[in-house]
Image (tube, grey):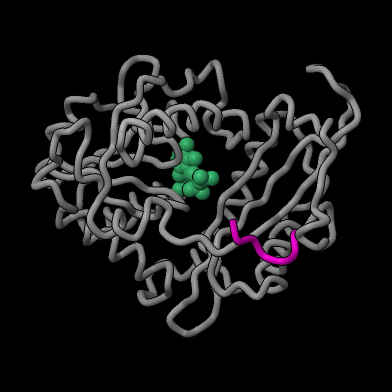
């Protein structure tokens, strides 16, 4: 992974090769850490803009709150460090990864007082599911792995340990020759993909899974607003696997995946088996906003 030369760690920048942790780092053993994934785009004016930075940092603090982790920095400090990280690494465009984790010292599950550490790294990251996928759509498979039960893992928190479920599902889908896994919730309704939220469209009506077993995606929220402004009806409602099969269009949203069309699910063509017109319209509106081509929602862009 081509990361930048510098990583912000616990309040200061260190060289990439010096951003190390001890093998007895608590999070490494038990998975109790929280993180974010944020994108920065080069705008049409040549400046860099971070997409919905405030909302990502708010979610980082919410994730920490859910896990009873106290972040030893103020939100303003993390926001400032995120911007500095891009500048220091001379990245005009890229992906930013803040992570809050429990450091080394005590072991065992119940620890009264543990060291909370924070790091922010950034790197250049192209289309998550490939340029080809972004343009022509990807093939997805319903996973044999169920998405977290909301009383087993906290799905509103972006917890490191939650991603074991995602990795198992993603590997299974890739081994079977697909690009991505779609997971059902414990009751059998469509939840989300391994690292993306999901939208379906039927007769111009747009549906996305409600905030029950999913990560409340910031891209998902942006797309709901964009679609409504384009005068589509959007509902947050549970839907089944077969409803997915007979949709006219399906797409994924995520910071990394942006707006990626899905052209096939479980060997069933979705619509005509290529990105549908509404998906393409929404995708274009999204990219116009993140690159500042459209002045709508300019408050979503934070100048670096
Ligand atoms: N669901 C999950 C499980 C998830 O991990 C993500 C982000 C989303 C939905 C979409 O959320 P948002 O980015 O706020 O729109 N997944 C991150 C994972 C990337 C990785 O492989 O690491 C991301 O897109 O940054």
Residue 151 locus on image (x, y percent): 54, 16
Residue 197 locus on image (x, y percent): 38, 40
Report which quarter residue 189 is drawn in: top left
Q: Reply above or below: 41 against 193.
A: below
Q: Reply above or below: 187 against 298.
A: above
Say whether residue 5 is magenta. Answer: yes
Does residue 239 appear left or right of residue 47 in this picture? left
Q: How many marks?
A: 0
Q: Reply above or below: 300 against 209.
A: below
Does residue 130 appear left or right of residue 51 in this picture? left
What residue lies at 47% left-to-right and 77% top-to-bottom?
43
Nearest to the observer: residue 175 or residue 139: 175
Q: Reply above or below: 288 against 60.
A: below
Asked if residue 46 shows in the view, the reply is: yes
Q: Quadrant of the C terminus?
A: bottom right
Nearest to the observer: residue 150 or residue 226: 150
Q: Secondary structure of the magenta portion, mostly?
A: loop
What residue lies at 27% left-to-right and 54% top-to-bottom?
227
Nearest to the observer: residue 274 or residue 78: 274
What residue lies at 15% left-to-right and 41% top-to-bottom?
270
Asked if residue 236 shows in the view, the reply is: no
Q: Quadrant of the N terminus?
A: bottom right
The magenta span reads 1-7
Residue 195 locus on image (x, y percent): 45, 40
Residue placed furthest toward the bottom: 45
What residue lies at 49% left-to-right and 69% top-to-bottom?
41
Report which quarter residue 88 is drawn in: bottom right
Say whether residue 267 is magenta. Answer: no
Nearest to the observer: residue 204 or residue 243: 243
């Amino acid at each position: 992974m081509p990361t930048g030369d510098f990583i912000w760690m616990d309040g200061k920048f260190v060289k990439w090769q010096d951003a190390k942790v001890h093998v007895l780092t608590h999070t490494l053993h038990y998975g109790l850490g929280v993180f974010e994934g944020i994108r920065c785009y080069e705008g049409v004016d040549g400046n860099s803009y971070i997409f919905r930075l405030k909302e990502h940092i708010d979610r980082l603090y919410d994730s920490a709150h859910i896990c009873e982790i106290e972040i030893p920095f103020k939100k303003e400090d993390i926001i400032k460090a995120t911007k500095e990280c891009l500048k220091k690494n001379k990245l005009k465009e890229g992906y930013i990864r803040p992570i809050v984790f429990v450091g080394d010292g005590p072991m065992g599950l119940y620890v009264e007082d543990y060291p909370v550490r924070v790091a922010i790294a950034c790197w250049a990251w192209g289309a998550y599911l490939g340029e080809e996928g972004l343009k022509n759509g990807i093939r997805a498979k319903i996973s044999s792995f169920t998405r977290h039960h909301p009383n087993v893992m906290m799905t509103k928190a972006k917890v490191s340990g939650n991603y074991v479920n995602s990795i198992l599902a993603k590997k299974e889908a890739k081994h079977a020759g697909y690009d991505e896994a779609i997971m059902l919730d414990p009751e059998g309704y469509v939840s989300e993909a391994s690292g993306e939220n999901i939208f379906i469209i039927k007769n111009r009506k747009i549906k996305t899974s409600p905030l029950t077993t999913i990560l409340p995606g910031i891209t998902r929220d942006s797309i709901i607003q964009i679609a409504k402004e384009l005068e589509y009806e959007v509902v947050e409602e549970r839907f089944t696997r077969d409803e997915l099969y007979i949709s006219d269009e399906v797409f994924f949203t995520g910071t990394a995946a942006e707006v990626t069309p899905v052209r096939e699910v479980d060997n069933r063509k979705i619509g005509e088996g290529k990105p549908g017109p509404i998906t393409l319209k929404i995708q274009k509106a999204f990219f116009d906003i993140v690159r500042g081509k459209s002045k709508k929602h300019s408050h979503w862009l934070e100048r670096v």
